[in-house]
Amino acid sequence: VVCFSEENKIEMSPDGLHGRVEDRRFLVGKATYTDDLQTPGAAFLGIVRSTYAHARIDRVDFERARKHPSFVAVLSGKELHDLHVNPLMEFPMEGTRMTKRYPLATEKVTFVGEPLAAIVSKRKYDVEDIIELVDVEYTPLPPVITTDESESNKTLLYEEWGTNLAFENKFTRKSQTSIDAGKATAVKEKVGIRRQAGVPIETRSIIASYDKEKDRYLVYANVQGSHGRLKNYLSAELGIPPEKLHGIVKDIGGAFGTKGAQSYSERVLACVLAKKTGLTIRWSATRTEDILDSAHGRDEYCDIELSCDSEGRILCLKAEIKGDLGVGGTLKRMPALSASLLPGPYRVPNFEIAARGFVTNKSPSGPVRGAGRPEGCYFTELAVDALARSADIDPIDFRLKNVLTPEEFPYDNGAGLVYDSANYPELLRLLKEKSEYSRLKKWKEEVNRGYGSEKTSSVVAGIGVCVEIEDTGAQLSETARIVADGNGVTVFTGSLPQGQGHETTMAVLCARELGLRVEQVRVEWGDTDYLRTSVGTFGSRSAAVGGSAVVDASRRLKKDILAKASALTGIDENNLSMVDGQLIRVGQAKSLMEFVDLIRRVGPQEAASEFKLSSLTFASGAHLCALLLDVETGRVRIEKYVVVDDCGRIIDEQIVEGQIHGGVAHGLGGSILEEIVYDDEGQPLTTNFLDYTIPTSFDIPPIEIGHVETPSTISLDGAKGVGESGTIAAYPAFFNALNDALFEAGCPGRLSVAPASPQDVWAALKRRNNESTSR
Ligand code: MCN
C-alpha cells in the first residue's frame, strides 16, 4: 500500500503500513537514472566487440570509420596499453589465478562480445554505423566451450597459467560417528544450474567528463557502490589517486549483482576518451551488450552423494562441484562459496567437498543474486529430498531430524563458515502450519488418485520443500553520516539502493533511534563526496551492516543532541528523551520542545560511523511449492508457494516481503526459463528478451509469507539480510515439487539440472511413456 500526503510525504495507510518513501518517485516517472541526465554537447561511446569466441587479432583498421561525418575519436588496445592503463580490477584471493584482462583486448579475444576497440560519435544514432566501419581481421583459435574441454587443457585460455583451472577448494570433516554401511541409505545425484544472467531492466550506463584544470574526473554510473565499486576500481584501473575521481550514482533500475563486484571496460574507456577528446562521454549498453558482457552467474554442476542411518540421520556427504567461469571475472570464486554452504542447515558429521573453477571462452562470470548460494542450497536440498524419499520419511520430518537446533549456535560448519544464530525447527514448524501441510498432502493424494487408480485426469500433483541459509553482511564494514540542521535530519548512507528501498529502511532506523517521525528523515547516497569511504550494496549486507552504521551514527548523534538539550534546559541528559519528534522529560508525555526548534537553538549537529561487524550473520528460510503437472501436455502450474523467512529483526515488513517476492520470482525464472545458451563455436544464442526469457506475472504464483525473527547478535539493529533468500530457495523448492510430481506420474529418473524447460519436462515424460510402451 503506497500512501502519500500532498507534499509527497509518506503517511500511515489504513492497514498500518506506511509505503516506501521512494515509490512515488519511481511510480510517477520522476526517478533519475544515469541515462536521464542531460549533458548538452556530449559525445557517445561505442564498443567494437569480438565476433569470435577465441581468436588472434591480426588487424584493427579504423580508416573507414574515421571518414564517417559523426566520427570524433577512436581508441585501440595498443593505444590504451601505451597510456599505461591497468588490467580490469580483480580481487586477489589466495589460491586463485589472476586473469589480468585489459579493458581492450590486444592480441587475442577470448569471448564473443569482448571489447577490442572503442569509437566516439557526435550523434548517438551513428554509433552503431561507425562500429560497423571498423574492420577487424582475426585468425580463429579452437574455442573451449565446456568444463570437460577446459579440464583437458588441450587449448589454454591463458597460456601463462599452463592450465585452465582457476582454483580448487577442498573441505573435509571426519567425526567420530562411524558410517555403518550396512544400515546406511544413500543417494547419488548429478545436479546443476545452467548459465544465467542478471538482466536488470536498466542496462549498464556511464557518463564521464574530465576537468583539465582540476585534473579530476567526474563519473556518473549505475553501480552498486560509489566508493567500493566505482571510485576505487576506476582509480586503480586508470592508475590515478582516488581523490582525482568524483563518482556519483543516481537511481538504479535493478542490478541483481551484475553492477557490483564485476569490473567493466566501458567506464575506463569513457574516462580515457573524455580526457582525450575534452568532451563529456556517454554510454548505455544495448540489451544485447548487457547480456553479452555483464557478469553471468550459476553454470555450476555437482556430483553429490548423501547417506543417512536407519533412523534417517545424515551420515555422510560427498560432493564435487565444477564451475564454468567463462573467461573469469573480477570475483570468480562462486563455486567455492557454493561449496562452503553445502552442509547447509544440517548436522553433517562427515563430508568431503571439492570445488573447482574452470575458464572457458564465454562471458565473464561473477555474482548474480545469490552468488554461489543458490547452487549450494540447490545441490544439497535436491539430495536431501532424494534421500528422504529413499528412507521413506516425509521430507519435512526428515529435515526436522537433521537441522541444527537453536542451542547448537554458534556453529562451525567445518567448510569455512560459522553460523551465528537461527531457529530452523521453528521455520519448518511454521511452514507446516502456514501451508496447512496435512491438508495439502491430502489434496495431493486426491489429485493423484484421479490420475492413478481412477484414471479420470491427466494431472498429477507434487509438493516440494527446502530449507535455505545464507551468509549476509559481506565485507563486514559500512559507513554513515547523519546531519541534523534547519532542514531536518539527513542520513548519508554508504549503502546504495538499486530497488531495495533504503530510502525507507535507513530513515526508519534513524527515526527509531532519534525518536523522530520517519518523514523527518531524508536519506542520501551515492556521491563519493558525501562520505570518506563506503562499500555499497550486495551480498544482502545493507540491513545488517549499512543499517548498523546508521544506528551507530544515530546513537552518537542522539547523545550529542541530548547533551546540548541538557545544557539548554538545565535537565540532566539522562532524564531527557525524544519521542515522535518532541523533546520530553523521561516519563512525561508533555513536549518540552519540537526537535526542529531544539536544533535551531543548539545549532546543526553531525555524527558519523564507520561500523564493522565482528563476523557474518546468517539468515535462513523454509519454502514450500505445490504444483500440478499435466502429463499429456507437460504443462506445469504452481498452485501454492509458501515462504517462512528469518532475516533477524525486521526493519520494514512491507519491504522484506517485497524482497522475498522479487527473490522468489528471480529463482523461479532460473528454475523454469532462464538460460544463456552457447553453440559449439561459443556463439551466444540468447542475447535478447525473445531468446533469454524472464518470468512475467503469469509465471509467478501468489506467495504467502510467514516470519520467524531470530535477532542477529552481531548487527546493531538485530537485522540479517533478505535480498537474496527468495532466489536461493526457489530453485530447490520448485525442483523438489517437480520431481515429486514426476515420481507420482511414474517417471523413471529425476530432473536435476535447472532450468527445467518445457522441453526437459516433456522429455522426462516421454521417457516414462517409452518405458511403459516397452513394458
Ligand atoms: N530489510 C529489512 N529488515 C531486515 C532485513 C532487510 O527491512 N531484517 C530491508 C533492508 O533494509 C533493505 C532490504 O530489506 O531495504 C534488503 O536488505 P538486505 O537483505 O540487507 O539487502 P541489500 O539491501 O544489501 O540488497 C542486496 C540484495 C542483493 S545481493 C541483490 S543481488 C538484490 C537484492 O538485494 N538485487 C536487487 N534485491 C534487489 N531488489 C531490487 N528491486 N533490485 C535488485 O537489483
Image (spheres, rainbow, N blue to C red):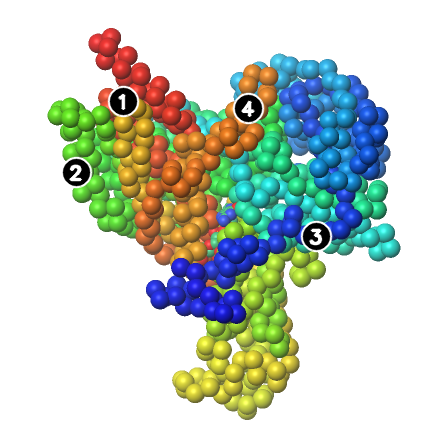
User: Dot 4: within a 10 Å radius of its alpha carbon, few (fewer than 14), some, or many (20 or more) residues?
Assistant: few
> Which residue is more in the foreground, 190 or 29?
29
C-alpha separation, residue under disc 2 versus residue under disc 3: 61 Å
- Given this view, does label 3 or label 1 mark the residue nearer the observer? 3
Contact check, label 1 and label 4, Cβ < 8 Å: no
* Residue 266 coordinates in the image, percent (x, y): 70, 39
- Given this view, does label 1 or label 2 mark the residue nearer the observer? 1
Give the SS element for disc 2.
helix
Closer to the N terminus: mark 3 or mark 1? Answer: 3
Closer to the N terminus: mark 1 or mark 4? Answer: 1
Disc sitting over residue 632 in the figure: 1
For mark 2, what is the residue? 442
Whether residue 151 sits left or right of residue 271 in the image: it is left
Disc sitting over residue 38 in the figure: 3
- Given this view, does label 3 or label 4 mark the residue nearer the observer? 3
Examine the rendered structure and indicate whether residue 595 appears above or below residue 308.
below
Disc sitting over residue 613 in the figure: none
Closer to the N terminus: mark 2 or mark 4? Answer: 2
Identity, as a three-letter code, of the amino acid under mark 1: Glu
C-alpha separation, residue under disc 3 versus residue under disc 1: 55 Å
Identity, as a three-letter code, of the amino acid under mark 4: Leu
For mark 4, what is the residue? 685
* Residue 459 coordinates in the image, percent (x, y): 23, 28
Closer to the N terminus: mark 3 or mark 4? Answer: 3
Closer to the N terminus: mark 2 or mark 3? Answer: 3
- Whether residue 176 is visible here, answered yes or no, is no
